[in-house]
Amino acid sequence: MNWRSVKFDWNRARAFLVTAEEGSLSAAAKALGISQPTLSRQVSALEEELSTALFERGGRGLELTQNGLELLCYVQAMGEAASSFSLAATGRATSIEGDITVSASEITAAFALPPILKKLQRRYPGIRVSLVASNEASDLRRRAADIAVRNFRPSEPDLIARKVGTFEATLYADSDLLASIPRPVQEHLSEARFIGFVSNNEAYMGALAAQGLKLTEASFTARTDSHLVHWEMTRAGMGIGMVPIELGDAEPGIERVFPGHVFTGDVWLVAHRELRMNLRVRTVFDFLVDELAEYFDSAG
């Protein structure tokens, strides 16, 4: 690419960025130290240059359009890059600092990540971490998170992923509940109580059936989509639940139901490809790759 042929006005982009962050032209103009008419002209000029509306102007003030929302993340990255460039040029970029959002499943967020993130804080005290605990995959392309821990490999071409390990889980039950089921347990599944899921329970039943454990909907006397609640229900003796082995094996009074049936899957650390150009995100990403690999290796 001939970079000399690329025309870009950073002042217009900065006007858009600050207006979006402040929520009004008057507040943005004050933050930038310019007049409101000047700011308005810069935003309008950028909209004309891009041939798209960035804001909807209505009775409730300025609101980002869908195109504006999609473009905002790029301008925010430019703003961070400009700030980092300024710090580096003046010799003040002495530490890695700023906000990082990490997304992971409830179990990973609750049990695996806290000690790892504590170590991250000790090494990089300027980093502020937001941990999103959700069993739904965060949309990294819309910047719902900077980095995500997933149990599947992403297929989107604009995402990068590193395999950090393999998780193992199996069925566990409270010892008293397990003792009440006649032996061999596998031949008396109809008499056992299982904990299922509100959503996608058919897929869960299919996975169990593939291991020779054929259940019916009537087998599931308790259901939840929360993996943390699933674990607590298992501990409380409400039924047989699927639990990661590093939790189940370490819990007193909880036993494996079928020692020969272990379910495995890969664990991936994922980030948007463009975010790897951000030193802070790249540093945290590489740190988590090493720490999660060690965690899952010891868990297995």
Image (cartoon, rainbow, N blue to C red):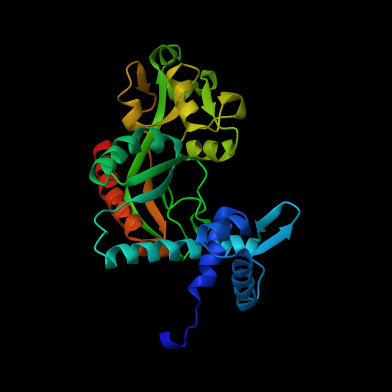
* Residue at the limit of the structure toward the right, as seen here: 59
**180 or 144, nearer to the observer:** 144
Q: Residue at x 51, y 19 (%)?
A: 192
| In the image, residue 262 above or below residue 60 | above
Is 261 on the left-hand or right-hand side of 219? Answer: left
**112 or 70, nearer to the observer:** 70
* Quadrant where the N terminus is found in the figure: bottom left
**240 or 68, nearer to the observer:** 68
Whether residue 234 is visible to the viewer of this picture, yes or no, is yes
Is 143 on the left-hand or right-hand side of 199? Answer: left
| In the image, residue 289 above or below residue 182 | below
On the image, the x and y values in percent for residue 154 come to 45, 57
| In the image, residue 261 above or below residue 57 | above
Q: Residue at x 28, y 41 (%)?
A: 121
Q: Residue at x 46, y 35 (%)?
A: 212
Q: Residue at x 59, y 71 (%)?
A: 42
On the image, the x and y values in percent for residue 71 come to 56, 65
* Quadrant where the C terminus is found in the figure: top left
On the image, the x and y values in percent for residue 213 come to 48, 32
Whether residue 159 is visible to the viewer of this picture, yes or no, is no
